[in-house]
Image (spheres, rainbow, N blue to C red):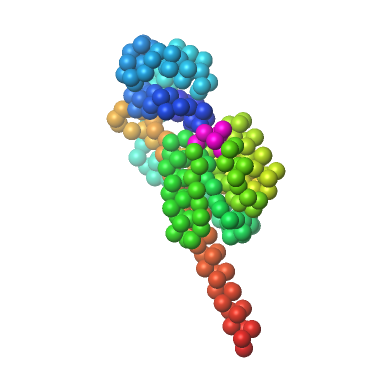
Amino acid sequence: MRIEKYINQHYDELNQTEKDIASFILMYPDKTIDMSITELANACLVSRSSVFRFTQKIGLGGFNRLKYILEDDQMNKKSARDEDYLEDTINSIGAAARQFKNEDIEKIYASFEKAKNIYICSTGWVQEIVSNQLQRDFFIVGKNAYVLPGAVDELGVVLEKMHANDVLIIISFNGENERLVEQVKQAQIRGIVTLSFTSVSQNKLAEAAKYSLYYNVIDKQVPTPDRNETFFTGLYVLNDLLTMGYADYRRNRELRDKDGKSEKKE
């Protein structure tokens, strides 16, 4: 859906009230199309001005433009056969896996090993969920990781407390948030290693980050409500592959260190 892309792109700029509005619209796009701005405000338990500010923040400029995008989304729904999503899922997993055969992966793992702390920043709902999962996975393999608040302004404050050689992972949808890109550049000036996860290979965030990994999304028609939904299969796979690979990296390094000590004793 185009409306979801608008929201994902500007998600970190929204306050909690605006996130609640976004949640309602994504859950009930058909209802929203038939609502006035007053009816939408009442349904979300917010003011009319809050709804109007929300439309401006996501780059639509007004409520009528929001309704136009929603109507256009509904008109352009594609019928998806069951076998389509299976093939797309296989392709998504394969695309994520192929990235782990390039030479940058070992460099990324070496950066993890050298870092005192790993910080994870995300923009978008699903990306926030994956950030928490990634933090948990790093904990399992014995590495400190911290999930940062989604707001870009808060990231700027946290950057002041990071150390050189720390790692900042940024999980984004399209990687086109200008303020986030600027923060990544500032992080690199401070000697912080940056790694981006984005859904497309050509974007400003990927270009700014030292290392970049990519994930595919899958559009699948769902029955309730009847619309196309985006599934982030590739992002979940990318998350798991990264931490499992790092676990092997750490284990192999420990084995090499033990073998080296044994040889010295002999």
Q: Quadrant of residue 249?
A: bottom right
**Residue 146 appears in view:** yes
Quadrant holding the C terminus = bottom right
Q: Does 207 sit left or right of 246 as displayed?
A: right
Report if residue 78 lies within the magenta region: no
Instruction: Residue at 48%, 27% (x, y): give it.
Output: 14
Q: Quadrant of residue 35?
A: top left
Q: Position of residue 128 (x, y in %)?
A: 45, 40
Can you see residue 200? no
Viewport quadrant of the N terminus: top left
Outermost residue on the left side: it is 224
Q: Is residue 121 above or below residue 222?
A: below
Name the residue at 64% across, 48% down. 192
Residue under the point 34% across and 21% down: 44
Q: Number of marks in the image?
A: 0
Above or below residue 122? Residue 6 is: above
Estimate the x, y position of residue 258 in percent, counting from the top left.
56, 77
- 134 lies above or below 257: above
With 188 as the anchor, is 215 left or right in this view?
left
Residue 253 lies in quadrant = bottom right
Identify which residue, 191 or 200, lies in the foreground: 191
User: What secondary structure characterizes most of the magenta part?
Assistant: helix
Q: Residue furthest bottom?
A: 266
Q: Position of residue 115 (x, y in %)?
A: 60, 56
Question: Where residue 199 sits in the image (x, y, percent)?
Answer: 53, 39
Q: Residue at x 44, y 59 (%)?
A: 140
Residue furthest to the right in view is 189
The span shown in magenta is: 150-155
